[in-house]
Image (spheres, rainbow, N blue to C red):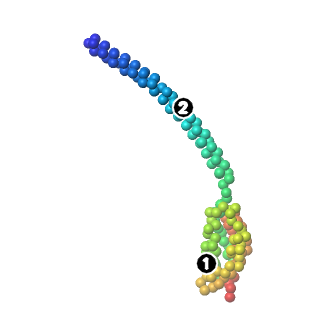
Amino acid sequence: MKAKGFFFAAFMLGFFFGLCFMTLLNMNTIEGLNRTKSQLSDQLIDREIKLEKLNESLQKQQAAVVKDLTLKVTFDGNHLVKEEIEKTVRFYLVDLVGKEIIDIDGEMLYKILNSRIVEVGDKRIKISVNYIIIYEIIDIGISAKLVE
């Protein structure tokens, strides 16, 4: 029984000495990994702070964008023809929705729409622009007259 206890004690003592020896051998590697981990954690925190500041500045500088287009058509005649005129003008201007307001040229809009002749069925209708208001919602007033 004493021999078994002696061998067990010797085994356990050797096991512990082996663990200590392996720990001493790998201590530099473990220290290097801990240093790398702390450096990467610091870099991650720095980048998160920078990203947060960039997001805040982008939100402050967010450009105003056209969200909708409203048309007011003045036409003395058939209501269906009036709706068709509005549909045709909307077709010309549909690409403006979603653009930045700064990129929209009001003078160009006026030149595109003013004095344009639109065909609705067998009728020819001349469009005149009354006003153009450009903001998040572009508001355009149009007068239409039948051309004979």
> Regarding mark 2 in the picture, which secondary structure is present there?
helix
Side of 14 where 107 appears, left or right: right
**What residue is at 36 percent from the left and 18 percent from the top?**
14
Q: Residue furthest bottom?
A: 148
Q: Position of residue 103 (x, y in %)?
A: 68, 63
Q: Position of residue 86 (x, y in %)?
A: 63, 75
Q: Position of residue 73 (x, y in %)?
A: 67, 75
Q: Is residue 144 above or below residue 99?
A: below
**What residue is at 64 percent from the left and 74 percent from the top?**
89
Mark 1 belongs to which amino acid?
Glu
Q: Is residue 20 above or below residue 70?
A: above
Quadrant of image for the C terminus: bottom right
Q: Tell me the crowding category of disc 1: few under 14, some 14 to 19, or many 20 or more residues within 10 angstroms, Cα based.
A: some
- Res 84 label: 1
Quote the CA–CA distance across marks 1 and 2. Answer: 72 Å
- Res 113 label: none
Side of 20 where 105 appears, left or right: right
Mark 2 belongs to which amino acid?
Arg
Q: Is residue 72 above or below residue 16?
A: below
